[in-house]
Image: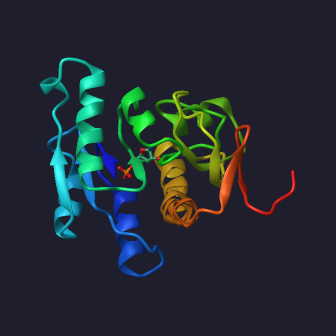
Amino acid sequence: MLISGRGTNLQSIIDAVASGRLDASVVIVISNKSDAPGLLRARDARIETLYLNPRDDRDRDAYDRAIVDALTARRVDVVCLAGFMRRVGRALLDAFPNRILNIHPSLLPAFPGLDAQRQALEHGVRVSGATVHLVTDELDGGPIVLQSAVPVLHDDTVETLSARILVEEHRIYPEAIAIVLAGGWSLRGRRFVPDGVRT
Ligand code: GRF
């Protein structure tokens, strides 16, 4: 798992593994911020942590290769971004093709990028939500694995809407990881399709 901050999605995945809802193990948590609270959550769960300082590497490529080296050395199958506030570069994408997941707090393709909940409020949509998608070189633009919708209320603030969406994030991210790990799916164009579905 790659994080930059508080790590509540990381926690939801740790909890899903602990309760048996997700048949997986979190092998390592990597952060680009030394003080990310999510690192403490990982340590509490006795998961290996690694802080990689972006300034130690000459360029983004070198930084991404450092991440790839750490992940391949531990033979991870799937990489999950959970509030990781950096663009994923070519080296990482090529090392884990269609094996990198991200969670985003809007119903993509609406409101990609930063401050998705604020964007949704300011646009005036009546429904927003959360999306888990495969990561490609398009920002928040990869094939969609799962989504969940929530209403946007007239008196919502960024905080109240974010909290409502976060409940759904914590529910669908472990579920999406289980789906991807289980296999039995393929991409048709940009669609994520379970085997056996005729399109
Ligand atoms: C979440 O809202 C997620 O959708 C977005 O960044 C936030 C991370 O929160 N990508 P947390 O660190 O998992 O609590």
Between 61 and 32, the one nearer to me in the picture = 61
Q: Which residue lies furthest to the top in this view?
A: 58
Q: Residue at x 18, y 60 (%)?
A: 48
On screen, 149 above or below 53?
Answer: below
Between 97 and 150, the one nearer to me in the picture = 97
Q: Which residue is drawn at 29% across and 48% down?
A: 72
Between 85 and 22, the one nearer to me in the picture = 22
Left-right relation of 9 to 63: right
Position of residue 95 measured from the top left corner of the image (x, y, whole percent) = 40, 39
Residue 148 visible in the shown view: no
Q: Which residue is drawn at 44% across and 34% down?
A: 94
Position of residue 143 measured from the top left corner of the image (x, y, whole percent) = 64, 42
Q: Residue furthest bottom?
A: 19
Residue 183 visible in the shown view: yes
Position of residue 70 measured from the top left corner of the image (x, y, whole percent) = 23, 46
Q: Residue at x 46, y 31 (%)?
A: 114
| Quadrant in the rendering for residue 11 | bottom left
How many marks are shown on the rendered structure?
0
| Quadrant in the rendering for residue 12 | bottom left
Q: Which residue lies furthest to the right in this view?
A: 199
